[in-house]
Amino acid sequence: MFIVRPSAVQVNAWSKLISDDTWSWDNLPSAMKKSETFTPPLSSIQSTAGMQYQTSSGGSDGPLQPTYPAYMVPITTNWLPTLNSPRIPTSPDVYNGINIGGFFATFAINPSNWTRSSAKASYYLARSMDCLYIGRGRK
C-alpha cells in the first residue's frame, strides 16, 4: 500500500470549495505528521534507486509507518534519469505539496519486521481502552 499525500493545489481547492481555511495546505501536513513515523530508506535502496527525500516532511511519533521497501530491482537505477531525459519532472520531496512528475512513493511498511502498517495494526490495540468505542455494522 502506497502512502502519497495530495498536492497543495488539490487541498487548497477543497478548502475553497467548502469555505473552510482550516482544510488548507498550510494546516494539513502538520496534522498528517501526527499520525506517522517516517523511516528513511536503507542506504542500499537509496543508492540503487537514486531517490531523494526530506526527513522533515514526515512525522516522527505517530503509529503509521511510511518507509521504502527493503528491495528494489536494479533497473530502478535508470528510472529517474530516464524521466529527466525528455524533461519529465521528478520531485525530491513529494510530501511537501508538490507531487507532479516521477518519484518513489513510501509504502505502509513497518521497518522493524517488514509487515504492513495499517490503521488496524496501529490503532486496534487501543480497543482495550475504556475511552474507545468501535461501532460495527452501522449505516
Image: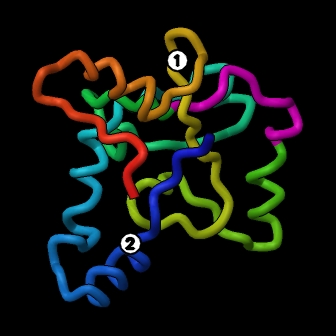
Q: Quadrant of residue 109?
A: top right
**Residue 117, percent across and down?**
50, 27
Q: Quadrant of the N terminus?
A: top right
Residue contact at pointers 1 and 2, CB within 8 angstroms: no
What is the span of residues highlighted in magenta in the rendered image?
67-77
Q: Left or right: 130 with respect to 51?
A: left
The residue positioned 51% from the left and 21% from the top of the image is 110
Residue where numbered disc 2 is placed: 8
> Compared to 39, does 10 lie above or below?
below
**Residue 60, percent across and down?**
28, 30
Q: Quadrant of residue 120?
A: top left
Q: Quadrant of the C terminus?
A: bottom left
Foreground residue, 61 or 121?
121
> Dot 2 lies on which element?
helix
Q: Quadrant of residue 70?
A: top right
> Compared to 94, does 130 lie above or below?
above
> Compared to 31, does 64 lie above or below?
above
**Residue 55, percent across and down?**
38, 37
Q: Left or right: 130 with respect to 52?
A: left
Residue where numbered disc 1 is placed: 111
